[in-house]
Image (cartoon, coloured by chain):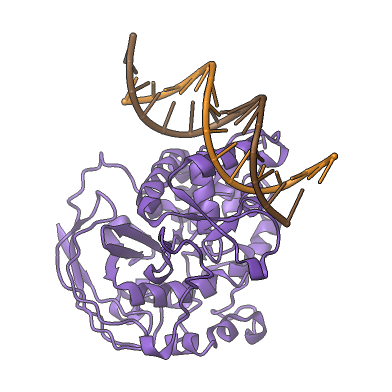
Chain colours: A purple, B brown, C orange
Amino acid sequence: MENISHTLTPSSPCLSTFEGSLPFCSSPQQTCSEGRVSLPLSPISFPPSPTSLSPATAESIHSSSPLSHCTASHCLEGQLTQCLSPANISDQDDLTCLNWLHQRGNLLPLQSLHKMTPLTQIESSVPPRPLRPASSKPPYSFSSLIFMAIEDSPDRRLPVKDIYDWIVNNFPFYRTASGGWRNSVRHNLSLSKSFRRIQRDKSQSVGKGSLWCVCPEYRPALLEVLRKTHSYHSTNINLLKKPALLEGAEYVVPAVCDSIEMSDPLSQALFLSTPSSQILTNDNPTFSDNPPCPLTPDHEELVTMESVEYQQGEVSEDMEKDPLSDSGYIELHYYQSHQYQYLVLPGDTELDLETVEILQLDAEAQEAAGSLLDLAGGVY
DNA sequence: AAGCCGGTAAACATCG
DNA sequence: CCGATGTTTACCGGCT
């Protein structure tokens, strides 16, 4: 048994003060002691300050964090996009180079960038392994597919056409499948309570139909289903990936795994909760009435949070292995439970779930972090 | 066996 | 009118 205490640094000065308990653990492996979270203000942005982590973790996270050079005030001033702009990257080998982000969507590689070979290089140098035939159907239900598609969109809402496109782009199976699956998608959207239709803003309406979003109250359930599916189907994949890590492989290239892994959006997506200011209600069903709140200087408040302590090692090996621990990528997850939303941060380069940090953030903190990540995920 | 869930097909209405 | 979109119903198979 080992107590681990990490002091995390908030992503930005826009995070407002949070003080509260942590009644929620993201996985059965974790035993979180309730406690207050207090983070010292730092100009270092999301993810957590390396200085408070182990040297190896700190080095890795710092060097792999594309946002580590960008403060939230940059974000507030709209300069983060410059920070993330390829034009701003003088050297392709620069640690802040975001080519990988462009190439892989909002996938955040786990390993230090300086240890990484650019994906284009790897993908061209690694002999292409025969991909799983396109006839192999993804294990994910249509609800999960829709969920992932919507979550992977910048605005967390998509027209059905874009949902089709996302599925086709991420799961080649549907590229050649007959059109019946589209009917299933529409059927699922209509029937499932998890999804909600939003009228498009008439003034800027382009295209047909409505936008679809995920009902926040059903997000945890959808995420859980997704995690279970991913966990179940990633077992064999992990066996493939683990030796590569042990042998010092520079980068685990999803593309050399089978088709599910290659296109696995769970490994790629940043599941970000819609900030509470954007959550749709029945009374206010359109974003045109309730536009997403941009960060404003009003949100710039100092944050103090205390370290989070939780138990490590109190986990039965029989318990379900969390897919996040083996995903090979830094993943940032929001959970919503009751009136709280929870942001799960990776606290270790290996992404062992025992070392994942859980922060409970208030709405403004989520918004701040979400905006940063939106920008990071929106540049590709 | 019954109920639930997910997938599929189909009919129909609406909309641009 | 046509195609895309959205809703609804029905049926089937797998799972618990």
* Residue A219, x across and y down, in percent: 39, 53
- Residue at 45 percent across and 45 percent down: it is A238
Camera-side residue of A206 and A327 = A206
Look at the picture and state if A301 lies above or below A270. below
* Residue A53, x across and y down, in percent: 30, 75
Look at the picture and state if A38 lies above or below A253. below
Can residue A268 be seen here? The reply is: no
- Residue at 58 percent across and 49 percent down: it is A262
How many numbered callouts? 0
Q: Quadrant of the N terminus of chain A?
A: bottom left
Camera-side residue of A103 and A128 = A103
Residue A68 is left or right of residue A25, and the answer is: right
Look at the picture and state if A8 lies above or below A270. below
Residue A302 is left or right of residue B14, and the answer is: left
Camera-side residue of A214 and A79 = A214
Can residue A47 be seen here? The reply is: yes
* Residue A280, x across and y down, in percent: 43, 62
* Residue A347, x across and y down, in percent: 33, 67
- Residue at 43 percent across and 85 percent down: it is A72
Q: Quadrant of the C terminus of chain A?
A: bottom right
Look at the picture and state if A79 lies above or below A311. below
Camera-side residue of A112 and C14 = C14
